[in-house]
Image (cartoon, helix red, strand yellow):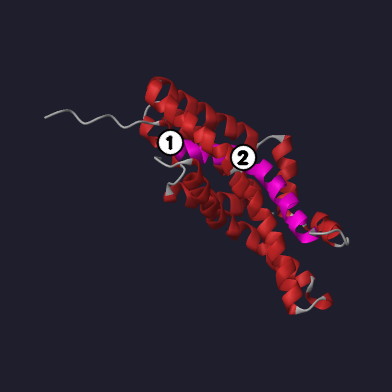
Amino acid sequence: MGLGAGGFLFLWAAMMAAMMLPVVAPVAGLYATSLASGSRPAVRAARTGALVAGYLAVWSALGAAAYPATLAGGWLARSHPDWSAWTASGIFAATAAYQLSPLRARCLTHCRAPFALLFRMTGSSAPLRDLRAGMLHGAICTACCIPLMLCLLALGAMSVGWMLALTLVVAAERRASRGDWVTRASVVGLLALAVAVPLHPGIAAGLHMPAAPMPM
């Protein structure tokens, strides 16, 4: 991507905020409503803001792992282009398997209904309770989605189209009524990518080095 660590981490944090704010917004809204009868508007806004800040901080911190992963992908694309397509295929296939794993199912159950855990934490008098609750919620949701983020790196970390598609999947999965269908559909899509990318390596732009133009 031609970015140093600082530039990449800044863009990653902005990207995570854009992607995950629509996901955490319903949680923040219900959380603010739960505080309505017991706090002033300014206190309610501050506590809700701390919850959201903690949530986004965890997703932003994930950039510390995403940056070396991106560097490794660039090295693989330059040094071993034949391997890179199969690596991307393996990432997609492994993510499809993780989507259906018991661990992810437990994490997704929390992401769909985090309020019992959040209220137990924020009902205490511990310092920074709302920030810590947001970080805990973010950590569980990150565990739910880390392989999907690895897929995003393979597809192109700053691809707006893939970012939007992933945001829609993550948000739709959190709807208890139809979320399981979205998960199954994502598995089908990931397996299709796993099959397609060895035939069309350019799909995995993050692991693909475009061919140099022929000299005239």
- Residue drawn 77% across the image and 54% down it: 132
Q: Which residues are the magenta region?
A: 129-155
- Residue drawn 42% across the image and 47% down it: 159
Q: Tell me where residue 70 appears, x and y as whole percent.
A: 49, 35
Q: Nearer the viewer, residue 8 or 122?
A: 8
In the rendered image, the quadrant that contains the C terminus is top left
Query: Is residue 79 in sight in this rendering?
Result: yes
- Pointers 2 and 1 in contact (C-beta within 8 Å): no
User: Left or right of 206: which side holds 134?
Assistant: right
Disc 1 target residue: 206
Query: Is residue 189 in sight in this rendering?
Result: no
In the rendered image, the quadrant that contains the N terminus is top left
- Residue drawn 48% across the image and 45% down it: 8
Tag shown at residue 146: 2
Determine the CA span between mark 2 and mark 1: 16 Å
Q: Amino acid at mark 2?
A: Ile
Q: Nearer the viewer, residue 151 or 191?
A: 151
- Residue drawn 71% across the image and 62% down it: 50
